[in-house]
Amino acid sequence: MDGVDKQPSATTRQRARLGRSIIQSQLVTSGVVLLVSWIVVIVQPASMQNPLFFGGIALVFAVTGAALLVPWSQKNKRWAILLPLLDIVALGSLRASEPQLGTGILLVFPVIWLARNFAYAGAVGGVLLSTAVIWITRTLNPTDLEIGDFPSLVLIPITLAFVATTSYVSGQRTASQRVLLTQQAAIIEDAFARARRQENLLHEVLNAVEFGVISFDSTGTVTLINDAQRLSLASFNAPRNAIVHPVAFQTDRITPYPQDSRPFARAIRGQAFDNLTFWVGEPGSRQVAYSVTSRRLETPDGLDDGGVLVMRDVTAELEAISARDSLIGSVSHELRTPLTSILGYLELAMDDPDLDEETRHMIEVSYRNAERLVALVTDLLLAASQASSTLPVALESCDISELIEQAIDGQLPAASERGISIDVSLVPHLTAQADPLRMRQVVDNLLSNAIKYNREGGKIKVRMRRRDREVAISISDTGLGIAPADLAQLFDRFFRTESAKSSKTVGTGLGLGITRDIIRQHGGDLSVTSELGTGSTFTITFPTEVPAELSAPGSA
Ligand code: ADP
């Protein structure tokens, strides 16, 4: 990682800081010494002749030169200690040569620097050395001690000790604050690097995926459009600054969505929705279908943070479904004509009084199977045209108990073939408003499933009851049962459970969907409870009185 390698190490940073502080301290010391030497040149030029005085000044400037020229960031910290020590010696020399100038107080600069940079040892060492220098330089003076020496011999060391202590304490505090700041800076740097990595990852992922993504903030301003969305816009020659396709068509591929009910407009208004389909591309030219989902985003404190739209190209899926439906539609339509003719001729043959028993039985079996085939083909046609949910029902007063009885009669041969018994003891006499043909289709479908998916020698129980203004018919079996995960898809067209597919039962997966559509057309519903391996109960409920919208003229 280049960026990381280029960062200076902690030791280098520490040395550079030390170098800066040496220079600062040294510049102040040499500045004051320069001032003192000017004053001496003006007031008492003879002092410059004194080698001790001149040597002291020269040493201070030499130390300053070293502070400026030595690359401290590459040197061990121990070398830096030489500079304040030499300063102390130089200042001692100035004091010894011209005690009345009071240059001893300048010792405060190297002492401060030592206390700040070499902690306890620096503070104590600096004060002791300075005191020693002050006392030694006084002993060099042959005159006797007098009261006037008191300030320099006692007060300056005390002042130095006080300054050293304060500098040491404040240096320690600054150091611990610096450590804390460095740690916090490292944490922030780390968090920032992580956020950058996640942002990069998200950016790459969003641009690598094949679905379009648009996100916008709470004011509706677009904050992101990924590559897939840009490509899609470009392939339909949308204007350069467009965010969504200028025109979106509804599922009929011809009618444009009104501007304010387009998915993007709805999402901006704060709506969340799933899998809304729209088409882009002018009718008659290349068209592409998108399934779009909108989600709201929230800030960590729960405030509105705009939203995101995700668009998936579902053209191939929709075209496959439409091709499948048209194939099924045309095949089943072609099958119905010969089947109707077969049924007609079988009926004629059964009417022949001279038929022997065996032949009659064979023709009856053929007739029942042909009838079943017609029912299957009819289901296929209905499902392919999706007409079952819109087919009107012709409601009339119907004897539902009789209708159930007839349905059971029709299914008895299939049930007895597999040794299945049907219990109808809980079917009281009841009349209700219903379309007799369609309601018979409902009961037939549920009964035939209860037989098909039952075990050999199993049981079926049919119950009917009226509660308030509602009829409930339930058909329970002791068969395969349905896994909980399959229940949600049970009414989807062409869905069959794995156990049904692996059993030898023939089916299309259309019956239950059609059954539910019919019962909904009656203002009711179909529900199921089931336990895998134990059995299932399918229950239809519908009102005994005709809902106003279903009894309207024309619906019959
Ligand atoms: P088909 O019976 O032609 O496959 P249906 O729409 O009637 O189609 O049923 C769909 C699927 O639901 C069946 O394939 C089967 O997997 C499951 N199913 C329906 N009724 C029952 C039942 N009584 N017991 C177990 N599974 C059932």
Image: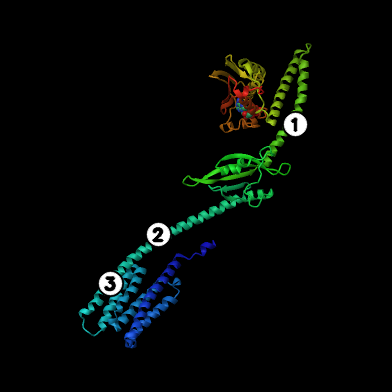
- Badge 1 density bin: few <14, some 14–19, many ≥20, Cα 10 Å: few
Which of the image's four quarters has the C terminus? top right
Q: Which residue type carries mark 3?
A: Thr
Residue closest to the eye, 246 or 211? 246
What amino acid does circle 1 point to? Ser
Q: Residue at x 75, y 31 (%)?
A: 330
Q: Position of residue 130 (x, y in %)?
A: 30, 75
Under circle 3, the secondary element is helix
Q: Earlier in the sequence, mark 3 or mark 2?
A: 3
Compared to 459, does 18 lie above or below?
below
Name the residue rendered at 73%, 31% in the picture. Answer: 329
| First-in-chain label (2 vs 1) | 2
Q: Which residue is mark 1?
A: 330
Identify the residue under disc 2.
180
Helix, strand or loop status at disc 2: helix
Secondary structure found at label 1: helix
